[in-house]
Amino acid sequence: MEPRIQYAMTSDGMNIACSEMGQGLSLVNLQGQPFTNIQLFQQSPFFHRWFERLGEGRRLILLDGRGSGLSQREVTDFSLDARVQDIEAVVDKLGLERFALMALSNATPVAVTYAARHPERVSHLLLWEALARGADYFDAPRVRALWSLIEKDWELFADTVGHIVYGWSPDESREFAKLIRESLTQPGLLAFTEAARTVDVTHLLPQIAAPTLVVQMKGTDYRPVAMARELAARIPDARLVVLEGSWLDLFGNSQTWRPAVDEFLGTAPQAAQDSAPQARDDIHTILFTDIEGSTALTQRLGDAKAQEVLRAHNTIVRDTLREHGGQEIKHTGDGIMASFPSASGALECAVAIQLAVAGRKEPSLRIHIGLNAGEPIAEDDDLFGTAVQLARRICDHAEGGQVLVSNVVRELAAGKGFLFGDIGDVVLKGFEQPVRLYEVRWREHSDG
């Protein structure tokens, strides 16, 4: 892909570089600003792979924000309003009536502002490693220490950021250091940082009308999951997906993020569609939750307060399902049945549910959870069969605060960092042969 570089002029007279490639759903990509350079992106094998995967089956639009890359460098205004003008100029130049809008990192506030102002044009909003307040990032002690190098030693700053982002892999870290130095000038970065630090679009989040997917990598320590969770909670019906790996995995391993993004945008490439049977999409990990002693709880607390406990359970479970890519299948009265495409995602969700319950001050709620994996029968938005029945019985066998799983779940999640205790062979109602069960030691997992 060697896209032709075009230029669009903003309403305040700035020339903004942009390019487009591919066909299909239009996806405007605001790469992590201000370190952007369309030309270098295409010359770098590392970044080229990222854009190639992102653009499969889509019309991908890239742009360099004002002051960076191939766009006009003589810039003094890096305000949020000014940066939104960059998007407005590019989409008007390319004649985009309706499109998906994607933003990484510090570009999030720009995308959020545009989507709030132009709801009729944004079909989907995709936010990666997102933040609503610039201070949440720039005022973090680690970032402040790093950014202090900008004035002291520009070359050292670029090299250090390259190593932090890409580890000590020499090729990628050198490429990113080069990208920094050739994306903008030292004074330009200082001016950008000063403006970006004061940005806060929290008040705009409830105004977002487009379907929104927030993607957060678990291994990004300077941008914790809690920040993404807070942002997603403020956007109506937003979905948060927490993925394994670090920021580097966004670029180096498309299988980390591609299923969630393709599903959200509804534009899975044909190659991915053709390979679906081999990917065994018929395998599900089934999760059941149940409230411990719900009948006794009602007798002890009364109908009204017992109902409050049930609502708390439903809220915790449903919020956590959204965060971990789970699909609620049905409400079972005192619990919820859900399905996951991966065992590790289901286990992460189960651990997160128990942690959320344990963090409540009100002790009346205790949940037992059971998981099994297999090939259930799908019919009328429900799942049936032996795999589901076994998950149900495993949940029934668990005690409050426990997460029990079948051996197949344990094996599917091997090497993913989960801790299991062997319960032994257990006879479950309706199953002639004993079933080997394992307890997820979720308290130790969370400590690690």
Image (cartoon, rainbow, N blue to C red):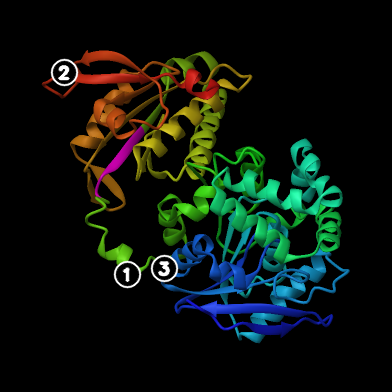
Question: Upstream in the sequence, badge 3 or badge 2?
Answer: 3
Type of amino acid under label 3: Thr
Left or right, 155 with reference to 367: right
Q: CA distance from mark 1 to mark 2?
A: 43 Å
Query: With respect to residue 188, does 328 lie above or below?
Result: above
Query: With respect to residue 295, does 314 lie above or below?
Result: below
| Residue at mark 3 | 267
Residue sitting at 80 percent across and 39 percent down? 145
| Residue at mark 2 | 434
Q: Residues within 10 Å of mark 1 (few under 14, many from 20)?
A: few
Q: Nearer the viewer, residue 446 or 48?
A: 48
Q: Give x and y (percent) for residue 141.
A: 78, 36
Residue sitting at 76 percent across and 44 percent down? 136
Query: With respect to residue 359, does 27 lie above or below?
Result: below
Q: Residues within 10 Å of mark 3 (few under 14, many from 20)?
A: some
Q: Let me know if residue 284 is in the magenta part.
A: yes
Q: Nearer the viewer, residue 227 or 10?
A: 10
Element on which disc 3 rests = loop
Give the foreground label among 3 and 2: 3
Q: CA distance from mark 3 to mark 2?
A: 44 Å
Q: Give x and y (percent) for residue 104.
A: 62, 57
Element on which disc 1 rests = helix
Type of amino acid under label 2: Pro
Magenta residues (range): 282-287
Element on which disc 2 rests = loop
Residue sitting at 26 percent across and 52 percent down? 279
Residue sitting at 64 percent across and 53 percent down? 235
